[in-house]
Amino acid sequence: MIKNISNLGDAALYCDFGNEVNKSINSQVIKYFKTIKEKKFEGINNLTPSYNKLIISYDLKKTNFKEVKNYVENINPEDSEDINSKKLEIPVCCHENLSMDIKRLEEILKLSREKILENFLNKEYFCYMTGFIAGMPFLGDLDENMRAQRLETPRVKVPKGSVALTEQFANIYTFESPGGWNILGNTPLDVFDSSKEDKPNLINPGDTVVFKEITLDQYKNYNE
Amino acid sequence: MSSNYLDIIRPGINTTFQDKGRDHLYHIGIPFSGAMDNRNYLIANKLVNNNLDSAVIEFAYQGPHIKYSGEKINFAITGDVIFSIKKKDTEIEGKCYESYQIENGDEINIISTNKSVYGYLALGGEFDLKFQWNSCSINTKANIGSNNGKKLDVGQRINLKKINSNKDIKKTNYINTKIENIRVIKGTNFDYFSEEGKKIFYEKEFTVSKLSDRMGMRLEGPKIDNIVNTNIKSEGLIKGVIQVPADGNPIIMLSDHGTIGGYPKIGVVASVDYDRLVQMSPGSKIKFKEINLSDAETLFKLYEMETQNLLSQI
């Protein structure tokens, strides 16, 4: 449940569900997100669910903090329909050309390449949220022995499709962008497609993801 | 083929189509975008008898040089902009906040914005543009919007679908006011910073850095010391949020910002000051002044009334 509601600036509500990151808190966030999204409260123009927070932005010309807060406090999220979560399989190629940070990961985690891949691939991931730049899915949780910090100096350009790790999370770069996550491989799959306006994201909050290893040849021929 | 079009002789540095922007998409990682300086965007459209949510050409610093072909059309430029209009045998210096009529073969040369960042060029008609999520606003980071999500380029031709039949010439005496104090509301991680850091934030001057664009404005100045944690669990952002990363230099989120971030939020720029904030060019000095939520709401209401007033007089 929401532990505290405060204002983020003069045009957003900051709903705090706690400080821990886990599936049960995140499910609460998503439940509120889906309920509010469906009800289309006049003036609310954006909702950003994350691990344990929900930010509700509104148009200050149409409503204000007090009105939106009052509305959110009186919502019963149980009323909403169940989360329609999907299970997805994402192909990933971990060939050395694409696995840019494997050496770094081997050193930090003190595990062999084989062990790192085995750990990474034999796991189901939960999508906590999407965003930053269009469609990036924040997936968790990596096992304790798979957690590495961000690069000390972020890359100026991370290639599109990069599958990367940091702390307890995995992510997929949907566009070439700057970034500091540890790159383990690359997916040929388009995780974000702006031509599909109603469903541009392949992976959505609440979905479950497994990664399936493909060879470099399969990777190269994937989109043909 | 359209018979009314613009040819881009020189695109300028950061020239895009913008409109009111797009909403309800933060949760998939797509920001509002839209015209950075909303008031100047609206005035530009009003001066050429457009619907207020029509697409305009936004430019920063150096603007585009364009050649027009087709039947007579009005245009207007808003902001603080130096530009000229070239007709057959003459070239005249243009004035902002006035509409002009141009005809086949005329050129508009937008030389630069003056001690500000963004300017707007509206044409009395409708550009032929692709819309994504009800907006043609170009987001160059995710290649969303018209023009394949990319800045305008040299040699490009832009077609007009429609030209307004109302060709009344209009004018307003608006003057862009500059402010040195940007009003902010305390951020959700305000207490992450040392007493000294909080004092610095409200009392010292910061300088707008060159590393500023439609995504964010980076500031330089005395370091704001964090005593709790230089990272938070990633969470949503909105425009105007002031994040302070480990290096102690604040970054203000602007209209094309990433939707999620993991740096502590020291403050949020009050909506009333956003249009003026984005116009502060690199090298400008900023001081933050704290206001509370109810003052911020009242000030925005007044600002909005003033905008409506300005528009109704055009």
Image: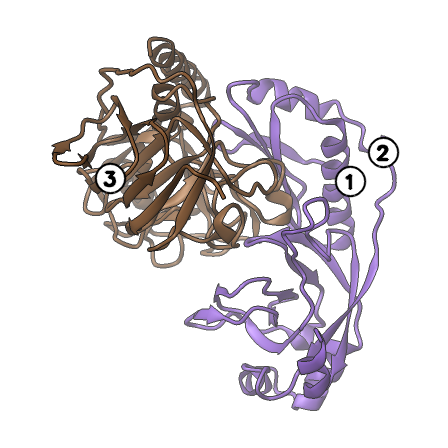
Chain colours: A purple, B brown
C-alpha distance separating marks 1 and 3: 55 Å
Q: Position of residue B232 (x, y in %)?
A: 53, 53
CA gap between label 2 and label 3 equals: 61 Å
Q: Specify whether disc 2 shares its chain with disc 1.
A: yes
Inspect this view and state whether residue B243 appears. no
Q: Position of residue A194 (x, y in %)?
A: 63, 52
Quadrant of the snapshot with the C terminus of chain A: bottom right
Locate residue A138: give its quadrant. bottom right
**Numbered disc 2: what chain?**
A
Q: Earlier in the sequence, mark 2 or mark 1?
A: 1
Q: Is residue B236 visible?
A: yes
- Specify the label residue A78 is tagged with: 2
Residue B38's place in the image compared with B1, above or below, is above
The location of residue B257, given as percent across then percent down, is 47, 47
Q: On the rendered image, what quadrant is the N terminus of chain A found in? A: top right
Circle on res. B107: 3
Point out which mark residue A31 bears.
Answer: 1
Q: CA distance from mark 2 to mark 1?
A: 8 Å
Looking at numbered disc 3 in the image, what kind of residue is underneath it?
Glu
At 49% across and 68% down in the image, what residue appears?
A: A180
Going by the image, does A188 lie left or right of A105? Answer: right
Q: Quadrant of residue A190?
A: bottom right
Q: Residues within 10 Å of mark 2 (few under 14, many from 20)?
A: few
Judged from the image, the secondary structure of the residue bearing numbered disc 1 is helix
The answer to whether the residues at label 2 and label 1 have Cβ atoms under 8 Å apart is: yes
Between B235 and A184, which is closer to the camera in this rendering? A184
Q: Give the number of the mark in front: 2 or 3.
A: 3
